[in-house]
Image (tube, grey):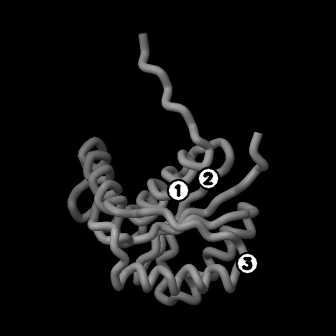
Amino acid sequence: MSAPFRCLGLDYGEKRWGLSYGDELGLAVPVTAAVAPSPKERFAQVAREIAARRITELVVGYPYNMDGSVGFKAKEVDAFIAELEKRFKLPVHRVDERLTSHQAEAEARVTARHRDRSPAARRGARATGEIDSRAATLILQDFLDARLNLPLLPPDP
């Protein structure tokens, strides 16, 4: 059995950081996104989450280009990761985030249709960081699945 761990997943953006939580149980769940106007305030929210949830590791979505190369956005994320490491002194894992934001938005559209949410309400979900935290959840779930090497469930008989 592996040692207990608690991870905070982060989906970096210039204006919002999606957040998610997961542990050795293997399930990632969204956390309220960091949407404050300044990076200083967003880092303060991350610090509160780390303390409240006793986080042991950080997992950050890494924006590879579709061809696998590293572009300008990845360099921004590298700087973000360096700041996380400096501030929190925790291990930081990079996880390929290609298409996670698109997948999170698609899931939100499906959910919105089931809830009969208007386009304005969906735009509100973007402003609140709901989509960003869904993307962070997908990123963290990929990490947890790989780390825990969870087998797929057999099909129903």
Alpha-carbon distance for marks 1 and 3?
Answer: 19 Å
Mark 1 or mark 3, earlier in chain: 3
Residue assigned mark 3: 89
In the rendering, which numbered label is found on residue 140? 1
Q: Secondary structure at mark 1?
A: helix
- Asked whether the beta carbons under mark 2 and mark 1 sit within 8 Å of each other, the answer is yes
- Asked whether the beta carbons under mark 1 and mark 3 sit within 8 Å of each other, the answer is no
Identify the residue at image location x=36%, y=70%.
64
Marks 2 and 3: which is nearer the front?
A: 3
Residue 5, by quadrant, is bottom right
Where is residue 36 drawn, in percent x and y?
A: 50, 82
107 relative position to 92: left or right: left
Q: Residues within 10 Å of mark 1 (few under 14, many from 20)?
A: many
- Asked whether the beta carbons under mark 2 and mark 3 sit within 8 Å of each other, the answer is no
Q: Which residue is situated farthest in the left direction here?
A: 119
Q: Nearer the viewer, residue 29 or 124?
A: 29
153 relative position to 111: left or right: right
Identify the residue at image location x=52%, y=56%.
140
Q: Residues within 10 Å of mark 2 (few under 14, many from 20)?
A: many
